């Protein structure tokens, strides 16, 4: 560990992620049917009380038909929570981002829109500052050993090489990178530690995909993740945020308690 | 008690308004200088140069300096704290309010912005060891008025105070229950 890294009072963050549709927290199943998991405000508050350091709301369908409910929810979150929150999903252009920020979001996250229109990264960074923008990158470890990025929820392969894209995202003004290892996502086999160890980027990295037990968080943080995002492990009530944090503290990781 | 939130057109004010409300204040967002408040809050987000430029609108600069000269209470948050200093390397031609001597510098860590929770170091036990939420790439390395600090590559000021002028480099409105406690104490 370098001197510079050691000289920090920052602690790694634990970030529960909520998928929201039509104002409700949902969970997709293999049958593409969405299961209702509850009220987003109630769940976010529950995680805040458990010690969550931030909350991410994803897949907020900001299309015209249910935009009003998404924005009403963001407003309610902004006036209720006392920790930072990020929203993402359905962002196509700067005006979508404007609506999210006007409703009180602290940060936005984008994936497909950034790849399709990289200039949007510059526009958001210039208007709201880098700190307001998380670029999500879905990476797959292909059978030939290559790291390839995907968009559209993991369905569309992108030609631009992974390393080139990261460099571009940083230069255009992203504040943080949310890295999902697709080959690990939902497998419960832990994060892709090699990917995190190689990710020596000049901005914070949020690791996502694969957390199934507190040890997975420990390994991701030891591999260099500045924050860890997880959904299922918390939603299924397998572990609370505080249980994960206590495990990390017992393993010599400083945490906010 | 009445609090006025200064609108410098830099970021959404919903969270800070809600937080000040929760501290028991009657809270009003003010788009131009206005009196009748017990305390003013000056939030700021984005570039130093941009927010500093907003001070030139509506005579904010004169009004705020006059407010401070009268010994009234004001709380600056994030870039709103940085504006209380002379200038910033982020935008060298831009002018701060120079209530505190010194310049805002780039944080000396390879990862910027600094994002997340950090534990305060302070001689005052109300601040000491408490976790607060930071989002910044710049900061004030040193000040005689620094009453709490954190490390990020190098030590920098988290809280500065001179009489009734208080600055937070972090976001108390995003710092959980302790953040609200802190706001309540400093607004009163």
Image (cartoon, coloured by chain):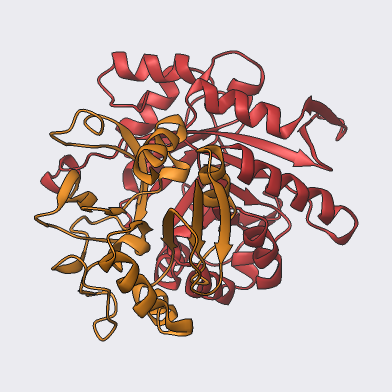
Residue A202 figure quarter: bottom left
Q: Nearer the viewer, residue A38 or B98?
A: B98
Quadrant showing the N terminus of chain A: top left
Across and down, in percent, residue A192 comes to: 45, 36
Rendered location of residue B102, percent (x, y): 14, 68
- Left or right of A172, for residue B182: left
Residue A72 coordinates in the image, percent (x, y): 77, 49
> Can residue A62 be seen in the rendering of this structure?
yes
Q: Is residue A101 above or below residue A1?
A: below
Question: In the picture shown, does residue B185 fall above or below B49?
Answer: above
Q: Is the C terminus of chain A in the top left, top right, bottom left or bottom right quadrant? A: top left
Tell me the residue at 71%/38% (across/down): A19
Given residues A234 and A140, the one toward you in this image is A234
Check the image and report above or below for A186 versus A99.
above
Instruction: Give the mark count.
Output: 0
Q: In which quadrant of the rendered view does residue B55 lie? A: bottom left
Chain shown red: that is A
Judging depth in this view, the residue of A9 and B104 nearest the camera is: B104
Look at chain B in the picture and name its colour: orange
The residue drawn where x is 66% and y is 35% is A18
Identify the residue at the far right of this view. Answer: A65
Note whether A12 is above or below B60 in the view shown.
above
- The residue positioned 25% from the left and 34% from the top of the image is B127
Which residue is at 79% across, 51% downward? A61
Whether residue A82 is visible: no
């Amino acid at each position: 560990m370098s001197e510079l890294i050691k000289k920090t009072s920052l602690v790694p963050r634990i970030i529960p992620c909520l998928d929201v549709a039509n104002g409700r927290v949902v969970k997709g199943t293999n049958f593409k049917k969405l299961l209702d998991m509850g009220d987003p405000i109630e769940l976010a508050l529950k995680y805040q009380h458990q010690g969550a350091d931030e909350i991410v709301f994803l897949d907020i369908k900001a299309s015209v038909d249910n935009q009003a409910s998404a924005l009403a929810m963001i407003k309610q979150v902004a006036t209720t929570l006392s920790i930072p929150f990020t929203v993402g999903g359905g962002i196509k252009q700067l005006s979508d981002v404007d609506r999210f920020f006007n409703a009180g979001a602290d940060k936005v996250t984008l994936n497909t829109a950034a790849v399709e229109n990289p200039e949007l990264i510059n526009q958001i960074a210039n208007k709201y500052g880098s700190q307001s923008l998380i670029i999500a990158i879905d990476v797959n470890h292909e059978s030939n050993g290559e790291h390839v990025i995907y968009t559209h929820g993991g369905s569309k392969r992108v030609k631009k090489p992974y390393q080139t894209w990261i460099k571009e995202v940083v230069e255009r003004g992203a504040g943080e990178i949310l890295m999902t290892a697709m080959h690990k996502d939902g497998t419960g086999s832990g994060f892709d530690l090699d990917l995190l160890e190689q990710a020596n980027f000049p901005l914070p990295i949020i690791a996502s995909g694969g957390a199934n037990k507190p040890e997975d968080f420990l390994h991701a943080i030891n591999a260099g993740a500045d924050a860890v995002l997880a959904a299922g492990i918390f939603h299924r009530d397998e572990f609370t945020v505080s249980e994960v944090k206590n495990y990390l503290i017992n393993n010599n990781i400083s945490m906010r308690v | 008690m009445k609090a006025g939130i200064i609108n410098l057109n830099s970021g959404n004010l919903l969270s800070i308004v809600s937080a000040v409300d929760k501290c028991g204040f009657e809270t009003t967002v003010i788009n131009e200088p206005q009196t009748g408040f017990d305390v003013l809050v000056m939030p700021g987000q984005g570039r130093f140069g941009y927010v500093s430029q907003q001070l030139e609108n509506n005579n904010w600069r004169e009004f705020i300096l006059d407010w401070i000269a009268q010994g009234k209470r004001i709380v600056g948050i994030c870039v709103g704290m940085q504006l209380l200093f002379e200038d910033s390397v982020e935008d060298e031609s831009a002018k701060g309010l120079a209530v505190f001597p010194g310049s805002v510098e780039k944080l000396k860590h390879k990862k910027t912005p600094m994002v997340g929770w950090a534990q305060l170091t302070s001689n005052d036990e109300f601040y000491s060891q408490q976790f607060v939420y930071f989002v910044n790439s710049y900061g004030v390395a040193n000040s005689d008025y620094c009453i709490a600090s954190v490390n990020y590559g190098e030590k920098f000021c988290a809280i500065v105070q001179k009489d009734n002028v208080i600055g937070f480099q972090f976001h108390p409105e995003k710092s959980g229950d302790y953040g609200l406690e802190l706001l309540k104490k400093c607004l009163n």
